[in-house]
Amino acid sequence: MTNAPEASPAPSSETVLRHIVMLSGGKDSTALALYLRQKYPQRRFEYLFCDTHKELPETYEYLARIEARLGCRVERLASRHGDRGFDHYLKIYRGFLPSPQARWCTRQLKIEPFERYVGDDPARLYVGLRADERRDGYISTKRNIQPVFPFREDGIERADVMRILEESGVGLPSYYEWRSRSGCYFCFFQQRGEWVRLKERYPELYEKAKQYEKQEQGYTWVQNESLSELEAPERQREILRREKERKERLAARRRPRTLAQTYGFSELDETDRDDGCLICHL
């Protein structure tokens, strides 16, 4: 029988510097946690996950696998309003849904809980940006939080991340079978094909996402299209057809060059676009 993971030890009053790894439920931050544990076995890391309470079931299952491998608990952080955080802030924003142009959910449900947890303690935040990415990492406005990029410093690329996950036995989160990103089930960075698959796999979550929309005010998760319109059978078939054609065009232009593509996860390319929220999607 596998023993339940133990809680990560809290820093003592004598701790000068805290070492923090923020987990998103995605491949890169998970590989980073495993990599750092192996590279610095004597260093005491704190593993954090900002829980919006709007996550996919696969995300929580993946966190359990990570905890079992690390042998310690991943601390769940929540907003000041706990499991009603998103709904509380949605009222404050008068029903205005978060979007790529107004990412208030990232600030209220991810960054604020993290910075509140760290307080004024000097801390290093280890960020899982790889050497082969062109994105900027999350930089806290708090001067006591120093970002560190071990993968970039050590030349770790996507193929290395896949190897770390494979050799550890943790593997990839199962949502990668149908979705390219971690994050809330209604994340506005989802592609239309992913909304279709959310409808297929979790119709109850799709319905909940629909209830947040106010089409008459232009508040929809997908630009210029409501989820009610998107779920029409003919529209779903069109979306999936276009998605298939796009992937075929991409595959015809390039050869497999990473373990992700070799293992059949070429759709993970979408996780490296520049428009994602780093603290959500690593």
Image: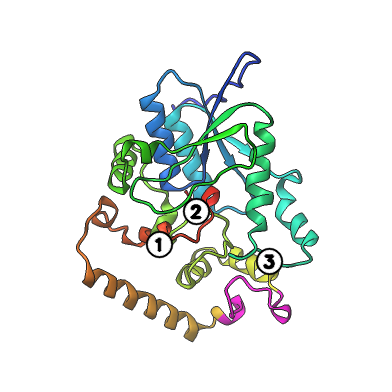
Q: Which residues are magenta?
A: 214-229
Instruction: Please tell me whether mark 1 or mark 2 is closer to you in this view.
Output: 1
Q: Is residue 205 above or below residue 61?
A: below
Residue linked to disc 2: 182
Circle 1 sits on which residue?
270
The disc, 3 or 2, on the residue closer to the chain's N-terminal end is 3
Above or below for 126 versus 192:
above
Percent position (x, y) of residue 83? 71, 48
The mark nearer the N terminus, 1 or 2, is 2
The local secondary structure at tag 3 comes to loop
Q: Is residue 223 magenta?
A: yes
Q: Of marks 3 and 1, which one's residue comes earlier in the chain?
A: 3
Decide: few, some or many residues near mark 3? Use Cα within 10 Å; few <14, some 14-19, many ≥20: many
Asked if disc 3 and disc 1 are in contact, CB closer than 8 Å, the reply is no
Q: Is residue 66 above or below residue 162?
A: above
In this picture the colour scheme is rainbow
Please name the residue that numbered disc 3 is placed on.
Answer: 97
Callout 2 amino acid? Ser
Query: Is label 1 in a helix, a strand or a loop?
Result: helix
Q: Whole-percent x and y of residue 230?
A: 55, 79
Q: Residue drawn at (79%, 61%), measured in percent from left and top?
A: 91
The residue tagged with tag 2: helix, strand or loop?
A: loop
Real-space Cα distance between discs 3 and 2? 19 Å
Left or right of 156, for residue 32: right
Residue 136 or residue 151, whichever sits in front? 136
Figure quadrant of the N terminus: top left
- Amino acid type, label 1: Glu
Spot occupied by residue 45 in the image (x, y as percentages of width and height)? 51, 26
